[in-house]
Image (spheres, rainbow, N blue to C red):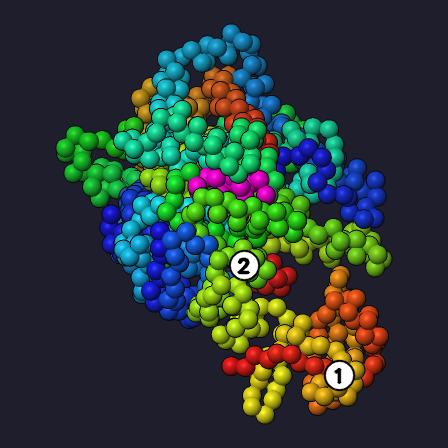
Amino acid sequence: MRIDIVNAVKTFKGSERPAINGIDMTVGDGELVALLGPSGSGKTTLLRAIAGLETLEAGEIRFDGVNVAGRDTRDRNVGFVFQHYALFRTMTVLDNVGFGLSVRPRASRPSKAEIRARARELIRLVQLEGYEERFPAQLSGGQRQRVALARALAIDPAVLLLDEPFGALDAKVRKDLRRWLRELHDRTGHTTLFVTHDQEEALELADRVAVINAGRLEQIAPPAELYARPATPFVCEFLGSVNRLATPAGAVYVRAHEIELVPPGTPEARAAIVVAVRAAGPRVHVELELAEGGRVEAELLAEDFAATGFTAGSAVGAAIRRTHAF
Amino acid sequence: MFARAASPRVIPGFGPTLGFTLAYLSLVVLLPLAMIPLKALGLSGAEVLAIVTDARTLHAIGLSFGAALAAAAVNAVLGTLLAWVLVRYDFPARRLVDALIDLPFALPTAVAGISLAALYAPNGWIGERLAPLGLKVAYTPLGIVVALIFVGLPFVVRTVEPVLEALDAEVEEAAATLGASWFAGFRRVVLPLIGPAVLTGFAMALARGIGEYGSVIFIAGNLPMVSEIAPLLIAIRLEEYNDAAAAMIALLMLAAAFALLLTINLLQAWARRRIGG
Amino acid sequence: MTLLAPRRSPLVGESATTRRVLLALALAAIGLFLLLPLATVFAEALSKGWGAYFEGLADPDARAAIRLTLLVAAISVAVNFAFGIAAAWAVTKFDFPGKSLLVTFIDLPFSVSPVIAGLIYVLLFGAHGLIGPWLIAHGVEVIFAVPGIVLATVFVTLPFVARELIPTMEMLGRGDEEVARTLGASGWQIFFRVTLPNVKWAALYGVLLCNARAMGEFGAVSVVSGHLRGQTDTMPLHIEILYNEYNFVAAFAVASLLALMALFTLALKSALEAVTENPGR
C-alpha cells in the first residue's frame, strides 16, 4: 500500500511550535522507510498520525490515494509497534499475538483453533517457538520486541509502523534484530515506516531515509544519496561527524573522514598542527589547529595514522578532499 | 458519539464515561451538598447571628477542632515513629503489625466507639488503672482525643512510609561521615525530607477528626458545653426539626475545615518548594 | 507496602539501644491503641459465655440489622464500582479541561463529616426538605427509610473504587488501549480484555475498602435512619441501641461480627498487596 502525507500539520495543546509543520512525503508500496531525526523533531507524532493515534489539524494522510482523516484507528488496519512494546501483561505470548484476530467482529472472526494456529505460525516467524505460554514479564527485551512485531503482523496490516523499534535494547541485540527485521521485511513485503534517532540504524536498514527536524522534512532519499548529497546543512551535520569551516564564500562542511593528513607544505593542503589524538577502536580522531585559524577533526584508520608517523605537536598538511556547501 | 464530533479520540468511551461521572457526581454529591448553603441562606441575619454566637455551638465547634488538632498532633509523632520502625527495623510479626495499622480504616467507628468506651470507663480495663492517678478519660474531652487518635492513626504512617523508603541512604551516610550523631542526622537530615509527608498525614487525620462522629459519641459523654462535639450538635438540631440551625452549623464547620486545610496546603507547598520535592 | 525484608538499613550511627527503645515504644503504641480495643470487642462479647453471645446474635432485630447492612453494602459497592470504573476511564484515558477539579470533587465525600452527609439528604428528602414533601405526597419515603440509608452510604463510600483505580490506570498509561485499538478492538473489548485484567487487583482493593466502610458507616446513616428497630436499623445502629440499653453482651456480639469483617478485610488487603508487589502474572 502506498502512503501519501500531504502538508501535514499538528500542534499540541499548550505548545507554541507545531510538532509537525507541513510535511510532504510518499512511501511507496512495499518500501521500508526510516524517519530519522533528533528527539522532539516530530517523527513519532507523524507516525502516530498515520496510525490515527493523533489527529492532524491540517493536511491529509492518504492510503492508496484515499484520505483517511475520518477513519478510526481501529479501521485503518495498521500494525503499530510501540517503543516500549505495550505488550498485554496479563496475557501469554500466544494470546498477545492472537489478540487482533480474536477481537474481530463475529462474522469475520476466525475460529479459536484457527487463531491459535495463525498465532503459532507468527511466533515461529519471529523465532520464538517454545515461548507461547510465557508472560511478557518472563521475556527479554529483544523477545518482547519480536512478540510485539508478531502481534502487529497478525492482523495482516496494510502498513507496519514501528516507533523506535530497537530503542530500548542493548547494542548487540539491536544489531541482530536490525538485520533480522530487514530479512523479515524482504520476505513479507509490508510497507514499513520506522522511527529512529540512530543514523546508523536508518542508513543500514532503510530503502529511503526521511530526515525530520523541528517538524519539517529536511530530505528524503536513499541512504547513499543522503550521505553523498545532503540537501541541507542539518542533514549534513546530522549524518556523521562534520567540520564547519568559515570561508569568504560562506560556511562549508567537511566530513571528518574526508580530511587527509599529508606532509606539511604539500600543495593544496592547509597548514595545521596536531593538537590531540584520540583512539576510538580501529579509528583515531585527530584534532587539528589550522594555521588560518579554527579547529577541525579528522578521522582515519588507526593503522593509516600510524603510517604517517605524526604525533601530537606535529606540523602537518590537511588535504580536504571534499566539501559540502549550501 | 458526540465526543467524536468535538474532537476524534483514539480510545473510545469519552462521552459516556464522562457523562456518567458528571451526572452521578452531581446527583449524589454536588447538588445535595448545595443544600447546606441554600438552607443557611434562608436564615435572616439575626438568626444567623444567634446561631454563630450561641455559646453551645461555639463550644462544640471549638471542641471538635481542638480535639482533632490534639489527636492529629499525637498521630504525627506516633505515626512517624511507627513508619520509621516499620520501614527500618526487622522484627518478628512485622508483616502482621503493618497490616494491623489499617485497623482503624476497616473497623466500623461504632465498634471502635463502644470498645474504647468500655476500655476507658471508670470500671474498664484502662479506666480503673488510670482512676487512682486521678486521670479521667471517658466522658471527658480527653476521651474524645483518645478516640480521634484511634481513627486517625493510619494516616501519617501511610503517608510517611513510602517517603521514608525512597530516602536516599547516601544523604544519611553523608551526614554520618560529617560527624553528625544519630539524633542530629534524624532531626536535621531525615525530618526535613519527610516533613511534607508528615504534614499531609497530619492534615488528613485532622480533617477526619473534625468530622468524626461514631467513635467519639460513646466515649464522650456528650455533655453540652463540656464534651459535646459539633457533628453531634448538628444531629441534635436535626432531631429538634431545626434544619436551618443544623445547616448553619454544618456550613460553619465546612468553612472552618476548608480554611484550615487551605492553610496546611499552602504550608506544604512552601515546604515542598524548599526541599525541591 | 508489605514487608518481607528490611527495606532500608538502619540509620548510620543508630545504636542498638536506640533501636530497641523505639521498637518497644512502637509496639507498645500498637498494643495500647490498636490491639487492646480490638481484643476488648471479643472479650466483652464473650464475657457471659458463648450462650449469651449467640443469644445476642439470634435476636430477630439483630438478624434484620445484619440483612439490611448486607443489602445496603451490596448496593453501595455495586453503584460505586460502576462509578469508579467510569470516572477512572474518563480521567485517565482522555485529556479535557477541568480534569483536576473533577478529581478533587471525587474525593470530596472524604472531607465531609458523615453527619453532614446525612444532613444534606434530610435537607433534600426530609419531611421539611426541598423535594421531600412532594415525594412523600406521592408515596415515596426516602428519609427514615431504606433508600435514605442507601443514599447516605453511597455518598460516604463514593471515592473508594475511583481513588484506587485512577492512580493505577494513570501509571499504566494509554499504550495498551492504543495498541488494542490499532489491532481492531472495540471499546468493550478493550475494557474487558485489556484494561480490566490490568487493574483487577486495584479494583478489588477499592471494592474491599468500599465494602468495609459501607458495612460500618454510622454517622451518616444514623441521621437518615430514624432508628426503627427491625426496619431501618443497620448493624452499627443496632449496636448503638443495644449499648444505650445497657445490653452490652448483645451490643458487643453484633460488634464482633463487624470486627471479624474488618479483620477479614485487613487479611485480604495484605494478600492483595503481596500479589500486586509481584506482578507478571
> Which residue is labeled 1 in the image?
A317
Q: Nearer the viewer, mark 2 or mark 1?
A: 1
Residue A315 lies in quadrant: bottom right
Name the residue rendered at 66%, 34% in the picture: C3
> Which residue is labeled 2 in the image?
A202
Which comes before the other along the chain, label 2 or label 1?
2
Label 1: state its secondary structure: strand
Label 2: state its secondary structure: helix
Q: Which mark is residue C270?
A: none
The secondary structure that most of the magenta stretch takes on is helix
Amino acid at the residue labelled 1? Gly
C29 within the magenta span: no
A144 within the magenta span: yes
Q: Chain of mark 1?
A: A
Q: CA distance from mark 2 to mark 1?
A: 34 Å
From this view, report whether residue C104 is shown above or below residue C152.
Answer: below
